[in-house]
Image: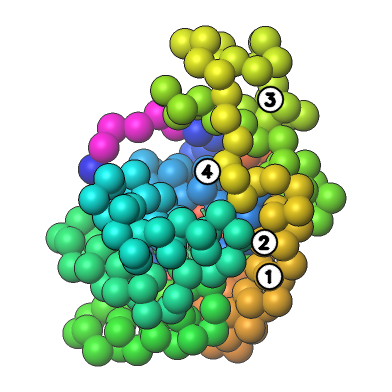
Amino acid sequence: MPVMERPAGSEAVTTPILTTPGPILLLGAPGAGKGTQAKVLMMEWSIPQISTGDLLREMRKDPVKSASPLGRQIRQVMDAGQLVSNDLVQAMVLERLKLPDTRRGYVLDGFPRTLPQAVWLDQQLGRQNQALPVVAVNVQVSYTNLLRRLTGRRNCPTCGRIYNIYSNPPQNDTVCDVDGTALGQRADDSESIACERLRMHEALTAPVVAHYRDLGRFAEVDGELPVADVTRAVMDAIVRLRS
Ligand code: AMP
């Protein structure tokens, strides 16, 4: 597992211990901060984060894969803020879950995002002896704040640092504080596409929320609190759901 920095603001957490966290699904709209929370869980509980968005972006960076017809199709779909096919993401997740670092548990970020994906995952886990079922925690943030978080997000293509022009701007408008590289914006963070992603998220994820709520494996936390408080609430919810 790569060595990584703690996300800013997450330092103040005292961690409940969970020996076998099992599969944890972090739900939340794009921009709700699931990625940040996933990284803290990963560090505190020594389990991997499985982000289908990251896996797809990695695939796009590979020159051979991205030049293939499938690679080009994925790029188009992602840049338009649409969802990649269930078959493709499921195949990607299946491969990832075979790696031994997932044995004690893992944090799912961005998957399952639709009801068929959730049902598929439950079935996969149901087939494995001793696999714990998924527990889901939804990080809730208002629509207005989500839009500011997404459209304000800028990233440094050199060191990967992420800024937000509203809440965490670089010292100089357009370049990275660390290495002076011109900051970029994800194509899918433009306003029209961000709105489309939020609309689609709401429509598709509501059934996923209902699914885990009905199974009694669901909790919701306030994602507008300071990062460390959100982390604490997420961890407490998971410990509760596993007890
Ligand atoms: P994210 O970084 O999670 O916002 O994902 C970025 C993009 O990757 C999404 O807008 C989709 O195009 C694609 N993607 C990520 N996860 C999934 C998924 N579970 N199902 C379908 N498409 C996905």
Alpha carbon separation for disc pair 2 and 3: 23 Å
**Residue picked out by circle 2:** 197
**Residue picked out by circle 1:** 200
- Residue sitting at 74 percent across and 67 percent down? 199
The disc at residue 36 is 4
- Residue sitting at 44 percent across and 44 percent down? 39
Q: Residues within 10 Å of mark 4 (few under 14, many from 20)?
A: some
Give coordinates of residue 22: x percent, y percent.
34, 67
- Look at the numbered disc 2 and say if its residue's Cβ is closer than 8 Å to ligand 1: yes
Mark 2, secondary structure of its residue: helix
Looking at the image, do the residues carrying marks 3 and 4 touch, with CB atoms under 8 Å apart? no
Looking at the image, do the residues carrying marks 2 and 3 touch, with CB atoms under 8 Å apart? no
Mark 1, secondary structure of its residue: helix
In the rendered image, which quarter contains the N terminus? top left
Alpha carbon separation for disc pair 1 and 2: 5 Å
For marks 4 and 2, the one nearer the N-term is 4
Q: Main secondary structure of the magenta part?
A: loop
For marks 3 and 1, the one nearer the N-term is 3
Q: Which residues are magenta?
A: 2-6
Magenta span includes 5? yes
* Furthest-right residue in this view: 144
Q: Is residue 44 left or right of residue 77?
A: left
